[in-house]
Image (cartoon, rainbow, N blue to C red):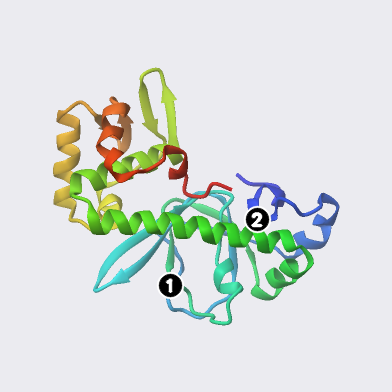
């Protein structure tokens, strides 16, 4: 649980003595799992800061959900729209577990940006990071076969949520096949078959939706042709 505004990376450089002026602007909200915080193309201007829980960012195309990313505590959402003249939401945001968040109005966020240039610089950095993540996702969707797509996405999850334990590496996030399919633009059947192959080859095990990497090096070798640098797999590396 994020309890200090300065633990939100975009606000990390604000002088601590200025916090009493900013904290009254924040509204705390709680959202249940599966609640949609924002719908794409809606007109709204709140900025969300995730304190606990996780959300997925997605768009709907021809009735199909395409997951663009997952945000975790410390992430800020809606700042791009707040900095734009267009109020329309770029994508939808849904809680994938119970979520606590701080909300700021667009007007209050822009006042903070005007007073603290570091917030604008970090907003730009976040935009660059998100663009990099989306570029990689586009490569997954466009150029790779299903086996390479799934291997890459599993490694992405590991570098963001992984916890090494001896020779086994756990991804400390429950992942269902629908999420993988919606992030990679393939069917659940293709995901199921590929995960079954990986388990049969001794690369991974799955228990209660948790992934365990039994042979991380071999799994990563499947990704080598994609020219990914492991340290750049972090989704928001601020």
Considering depth in this image, is 66 or 140 the residue closer to the camera? 140
> Cβ–Cβ below 8 Å for labels 1 and 2?
no
Q: Residue furthest top?
A: 166
- Compared with residue 62, is residue 198 higher up or lower down, i.e. above or below? above
Does the rendering let one see residue 191?
A: no
Q: CA distance from mark 1 to mark 2?
A: 24 Å
Kindly identify the residue that appears in the image at 55 percent across and 67 percent down.
78
Quarter residue 164 falls in: top left
Considering depth in this image, is 76 or 37 the residue closer to the camera? 76
Considering depth in this image, is 24 or 45 the residue closer to the camera? 45
> Can you say which quadrant of the picture contains the N terminus?
top right
126 lies left or right of 92? right
Mark 2, other Cα within 10 Å: few <14 / some 14–19 / many ≥20: many
Kindly identify the residue that appears in the image at 31 percent across and 43 percent down.
152
Does the rendering let one see residue 234?
A: yes
- Give residue 52's position: percent from left, percent from top: 55, 48
Badge 2 is on which residue? 10
Badge 1 is on which residue? 39
């Amino acid at each position: 649980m994020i309890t200090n505004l300065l633990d939100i990376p975009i606000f990390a450089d604000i002088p601590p003595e200025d916090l009493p002026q900013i904290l009254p602007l924040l509204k705390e909200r709680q959202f249940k799992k599966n609640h949609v915080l924002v719908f794409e193309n809606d007109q709204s201007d709140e900025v969300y800061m995730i304190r606990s829980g996780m959300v997925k960012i997605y768009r709907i195309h021809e009735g199909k959900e395409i997951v663009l990313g997952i945000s975790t505590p410390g992430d800020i959402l809606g700042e791009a729209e707040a900095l734009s003249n267009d109020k329309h939401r770029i994508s939808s945001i849904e809680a994938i577990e119970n979520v606590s968040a701080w909300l700021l109005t667009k007007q209050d966020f822009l006042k903070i940006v005007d007073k603290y240039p570091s917030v604008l610089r970090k907003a730009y950095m976040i935009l660059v990071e998100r663009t990099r993540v989306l570029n990689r996702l586009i490569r997954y969707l466009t150029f790779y076969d299903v086996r390479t797509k799934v291997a890459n996405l599993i490694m992405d999850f590991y570098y963001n949520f992984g916890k090494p334990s001896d020779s086994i590496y756990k991804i400390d996030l429950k992942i269902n096949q629908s999420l993988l399919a919606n992030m990679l633009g393939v069917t659940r059947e293709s995901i199921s078959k590929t995960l079954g192959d990986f388990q049969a080859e001794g690369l991974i095990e799955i228990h209660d939706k948790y992934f365990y990497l039994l042979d991380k090096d071999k799994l990563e070798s499947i990704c080598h042709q994609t020219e990914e640098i492991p340290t750049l797999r972090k989704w928001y590396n601020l």
